Amino acid sequence: MNTNPLLEDFNTLYESVPFEKIKLEHYMPAFEKSIEVARKEIDQITENTSEPDFENTIEALEYSGYRLDRVASVFFNLNHANTTDEMQSLAREVSPMLTEFSNDIIMNEKLFARVKVVYAKKETLNLNTEQEKLLDDRYKAFVRSGANLEKEEKEKIRKISKELSQLTLQFGENVLAATNAFELHLTEKSDIAGLPEGILEAAATLAKEKDKKGWLFTLQFPSYVPFMQYADKRELREKMFKAYSSRCFNDEFDNQSILKRIVELRLEKVRLFGYNTYADFVLEERMAKSSENVLNFLNELLDASMPKAKEEFKELQNYAKTLGADFDLQRWDWAYYAEKLKTEKFDINDEITRPYFELQKVKKGVFSLASKLYGIQFKSNPNLSKYHEEVETFEVFDSNNKFLALFYADFHPRSSKQGGAWMTSYVDQYRENGMDHRPHISIVCNFTRPTESKPSLLTFNEVTTFLHEFGHALHGMLSRCTYSSLSGTNVYRDFVELPSQFMENFAFQKEWLDEVAEHYKTGEKIPAELVQKIIDSSNFLSGYGFVRQISFGLNDMSWHSVSEPVMDSVESFESSAMNATELFNRVETSCMSTAFSHIFAGGYAAGYYGYKWAEVLDADAFEAFKINGIYNKATADAFRINILEKGGSEHPMTLYLKFRGKEPSIDPLLVRSGLK
């Protein structure tokens, strides 16, 4: 008899996912059966004849749908990290089913009636802080999803939600397809002038894998970024830039109409709740609280950074002229001349630092850092099931050798994986019946691949990306909450980047670099003068970097602050939104919105400003470590107990005040970035 592993208890170590047993044909029956089981669990709540209370209604709702959540987490995580055409097709079938089920719960009048009864008497229930937060969140989730609307409006919400789930999925699929569709195949030596040996070896390996001679470059970051930094041939840099910046814009994977429809539907949905814009709706449940606060924040940062950005732009233009550039700098010139100027000013670039950042050594150093700060240990367990042979698997233990989490690390790009880097989970931490269910956490990255002659050698940016995603992972792994919907990274979107961006600070600390950076061939520790150069160059072109991030935030806010459907072209709307931040002339073939997955296929709509918001928090938080010592146990314990363990169980500002003893100041960020 054929059994479906997704419908059975996982009889594995820590109930980890038995990836090798799961086949594509298992998913649909598993979704259908799990939805059926989840519906029965909801019926048990609504048909309970007892007076509604916290336990029989709110907690029962929290613990319902466990099997469905597990199936969905496996399926959608793999659809992002190791997909196929068949899996993407199935995702398009499954997403509307899940949206329909979600709508059935949120529009269930009997269920909402019970939630309302409990909410109305919350002051008399003697709930603890986390229980109060769960009750508030549950009640708001119903109201903010349309439970108080009339029947006709509820039906509109259902239709909108269903269409949105399909469109956001399609948007992401198109970006992946467009990224994979472009290849720059070079066979002439003159075309590869300026490119370092390691980059060429990787490009030659890629070409060989595809039965081609010469060198192959793609729009995946480990290929695209160094090409733009080092390739001498300007017309080829232009070609690469235009391919990257025009993804899903007037091509076969065009996202323009999809994007505008997503914006229109989001607006239509929140209008039914009485909100003027989608941003107003979203920001009500964020630290920033309102569009006005976000725009004031972004413009304050723009005022602080734009003068420096303009100085940097002028300096780079003048520098390029000294090297014979008889043209105005274009976007495809920026990384190239910036790399040369950085090398001249600080005698440092990625190819100088790369040999000291071998991936496995960096990983060991990142694990060691977690051990120093929080006393946790990582034990490799290659016997754990994995979804791809390249995935590395670990058991994580606390300082008392008690099991803390499972950790999966998937480091390198492939055509089946979406671009960028992210942290995710297969199981969030929660407690039930006195048992603490520990989380299963994963980070997925697109780092430089090893070649025939070299191991994976990371750029400095890849090192900070590793630390960033690992910070999210720690937030998940160290969680000590009761309810999974409040545990780990289930926090306000403009707070979620604090633990990740906080970890990036260590990349610029001499103590940590001294431990982690060793030459991959000789084992020689990174020279002190090179460490100093990394620190000295940390603010190189920081004004420009600020302005670029602010431009993304302003673009996001513009799309989600409209009070009417957008009639302009995507290109002209974006141009207007980002105009105040522009340093270059616009490239007509370019459009970043059509590949802006964070806001149109991820969870960052009206929230991209959160990266900068959290930078204010992380710079202020790290100030405490700099004062007390970067490995100071008391400071690390305070950060762990008040931030990392608490998830979303309390308001983020309450948690931050408990850790820091004061509200965050913008000054540490401006000082750290050389803007003040």
Image (cartoon, rainbow, N blue to C red):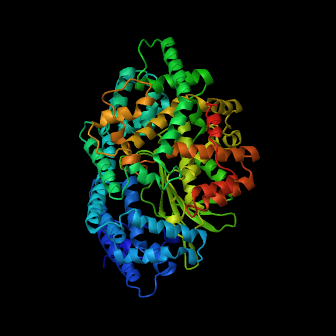
Residue 244 visible here: no
Q: Is residue 290 left or right of residue 638?
A: left
Q: Quadrant of the C terminus?
A: top right
Q: Position of residue 278 (x, y in %)?
A: 38, 50
Query: For residue 634, which quarter of the picture?
Result: bottom right
Residue 145 vertical placement versus 511 (above, below): below
User: Which residue reaches farthest left?
Assistant: 252
Residue 469 vertical placement versus 482 (above, below): above
Taking the spot 66% from the left edge, 45% from the top edge, the residue there is: 622
User: Which residue reaches farthest bottom?
Assistant: 49
Please tell me how many numbered marks the rendered image carries.
Answer: 0
Q: Position of residue 239 (x, y in %)?
A: 34, 27
Residue 517 vertical placement versus 277 (above, below): above
Residue 558 visible here: yes
Q: Position of residue 77 (x, y in %)?
A: 41, 58
Q: Is residue 641 left or right of residue 566?
A: right
Q: Work out whether residue 200 or residue 487 is closer to the camera in this orientation and state it.
A: 487
Q: Is residue 356 left or right of residue 47?
A: right
Taking the spot 62% from the left edge, 58% from the top edge, the residue there is: 654
Query: For residue 346, which quarter of the picture?
Result: top right
Q: Work out whether residue 346 or residue 655 is closer to the camera in this orientation and state it.
A: 655
Q: Quadrant of the N terminus?
A: bottom left
Q: Work out whether residue 473 or residue 664 is closer to the camera in this orientation and state it.
A: 664
Q: Position of residue 240 (x, y in %)?
A: 36, 30
Q: Is residue 86 left or right of residue 312?
A: left
